[in-house]
């Protein structure tokens, strides 16, 4: 934890946010799995969405692939998303990260970014709802330079990515559709290009090579249509992103009221919720639950809508059912704990502590969960643990001085050598390193 906490120091100024959502992450795991398998990367490799309308995808360490919401929402087929993932997976598998120019400046950025990502990855913000996230600094110019690949790396990532797609039964032509999104941008000034053009230089040679690979396989790739499962999860990811990120009135006009299909119903549920029409949102979710009574993410959505319309006892019931269906989803557990605290009964407060401790065990870097867990400890009279958890939250969001104050307080309240006391010492160590960095500047 200590080393992971370091990363955010000094990066918060150029904040971007990470989108955390259990349903979207579930869908991404489904779509990434065949690609990661073909690339020989662990299934634990995480796909992280950055809330940014520009088009980009990149890797900065071997365990995470980042993709902008703008790029995701521009895609029309799961195979396009899988093509982007295959290309990024190839950068990791081919060792392009370690071969980057090792001048002092980029090495420092690399170290800082690596640590940053460790955290982002562990965690990010988890607001349960979209759009709010931990601050990460991938926008700084130093990092942009650091993230850029060479033309040789691009060619090799394309070739390997195409091979992974074929191996995974995904139509490699989808790689061409992705590159088509950027056609014509070579002529634009750097400021008007999408950042993807800088991280992955696009050349005519690249396009020609990908085209040649696809042509060479024409006639052999029948049956490479996306599976119904892949289409389904891709549609759910997009419904959720567009429902939360786009203007609700526009979303409702686009989807219309008559389409009773699952995806249209999901999109409407979120748009009504975003438009503060809780009762319509609830009835749409009710229809989703009729279609799929055991879907933990629809139960969670129902919990979220009820919670945000301040119907706490019912929110507790919905989240409890979601947590029962998906006991390993940290974001769902965090939502359950939050609803229990809002309902504020004595047995509920005690249960909130247990549930939030389980969320913490699965994902200790979620600032919103940490805030709720501190409240649960405080309500139970455990001020020492409330301070430790608050110290961890401050450290994660980069408020190191506040983190130090809380960790010092916790050290005085908790028995020496206990688990909580040791966690407070970790935060103090991180605060000290951050302090010495600031002094060196
Ligand atoms: Zn690339």
Image (cartoon, rainbow, N blue to C red):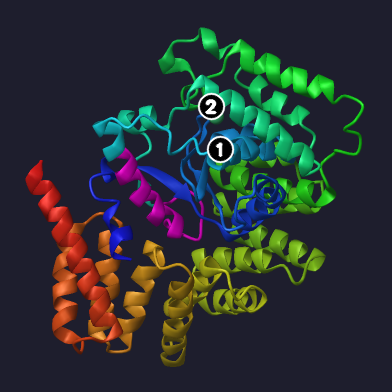
Q: Is 121 inside the magenta-drawn segment? A: yes
> Extreme bottom residue here?
347
What residue lies at 69% left-to-right and 14% top-to-bottom? 208
What residue lies at 75% left-to-right and 72% top-to-bottom? 294
Apparent side of residue 363 relative to residue 205 in the rendered image (left or right): left
In which quadrant will I find the N terminus?
bottom left
What residue lies at 58% left-to-right and 60% top-to-bottom? 22
Q: CA distance from mark 1 to mark 2?
A: 9 Å
Apparent side of residue 200 relative to residue 323 in the rendered image (left or right): left
Q: Is 298 inside the magenta-drawn segment? A: no
Relative vertical location of residue 363 with respect to residue 143 in this rendering, above or below: below
How busy is the neighbourhood of tag 1: few (under 14 within 10 Å), some, or many (20 plus)? Answer: some
Apparent side of residue 127 relative to residue 55 in the rendered image (left or right): left
The magenta segment: 109-133
Tag on residue 94? 1
Tag on residue 153? 2
Q: Quadrant of ligand 1?
A: top right
What residue lies at 52% left-to-right and 73% top-to-bottom? 333
Tag on residue 197? none
Q: Nearer the viewer, residue 418 or 386?
A: 418
């Amino acid at each position: 934890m200590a080393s992971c906490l370091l990363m955010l120091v000094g990066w918060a100024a150029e904040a971007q946010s990470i989108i955390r959502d259990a349903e979207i992450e579930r869908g991404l795991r489904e779509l990434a799995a065949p690609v990661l398998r073909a690339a020989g990367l662990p299934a634990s490799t995480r796909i992280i969405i950055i809330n940014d309308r520009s088009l980009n995808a990149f890797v900065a360490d071997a365990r995470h692939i980042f993709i902008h919401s703008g790029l995701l929402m521009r895609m029309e087929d799961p195979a396009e998303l899988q093509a982007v993932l295959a290309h990024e997976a190839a950068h990791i598998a081919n060792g392009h990260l370690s071969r980057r120019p090792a001048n002092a400046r980029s090495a420092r950025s690399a170290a800082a970014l690596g640590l940053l990502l460790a955290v982002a990855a562990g965690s990010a913000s988890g607001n349960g709802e979209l759009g709010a996230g931990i601050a990460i600094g991938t926008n700084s110019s130093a990092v942009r330079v650091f993230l850029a690949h060479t033309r040789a790396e691009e060619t090799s990532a394309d070739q390997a990515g195409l091979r992974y797609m074929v191996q995974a039964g995904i139509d490699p032509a989808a790689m061409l559709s992705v590159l088509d999104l950027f056609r014509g941008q070579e002529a634009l000034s750097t400021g008007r290009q999408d950042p993807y053009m800088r991280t992955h230089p696009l050349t005519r040679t690249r396009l020609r090579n990908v085209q040649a690979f696809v042509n060479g396989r024409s006639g052999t790739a029948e049956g490479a249509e996306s599976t119904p499962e892949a289409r389904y999860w891709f549609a759910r990811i997009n419904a959720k992103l567009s429902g939360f990120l786009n203007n609700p009135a526009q979303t409702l006009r686009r989807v219309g009221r008559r389409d009773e299909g699952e995806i249209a119903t999901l999109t409407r549920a979120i748009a009504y919720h975003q438009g503060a029409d809780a009762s319509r949102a609830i009835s749409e979710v009710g229809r989703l639950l009729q279609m799929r009574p055991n879907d933990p993410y629809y139960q969670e959505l129902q919990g979220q809508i009820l919670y945000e319309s301040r119907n706490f006892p019912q929110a507790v019931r919905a989240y409890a059912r979601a947590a029962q269906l998906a006991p390993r989803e940290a974001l769902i557990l965090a939502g359950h704990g939050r609803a229990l605290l809002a309902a504020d009964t004595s047995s509920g407060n005690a249960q909130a502590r247990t549930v939030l401790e389980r969320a913490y065990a699965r994902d200790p870097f979620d600032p919103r969960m940490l805030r709720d867990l501190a409240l649960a400890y405080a309500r139970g009279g455990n001020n020492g643990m409330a301070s430790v958890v608050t110290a961890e939250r401050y450290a994660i969001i980069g408020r190191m001085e506040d983190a130090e104050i809380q960790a010092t307080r916790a050290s005085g309240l908790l028995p020496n050598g206990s688990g909580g006391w040791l966690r407070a010492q970790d935060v103090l160590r991180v605060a000290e390193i951050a302090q010495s960095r600031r002094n060196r500047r």
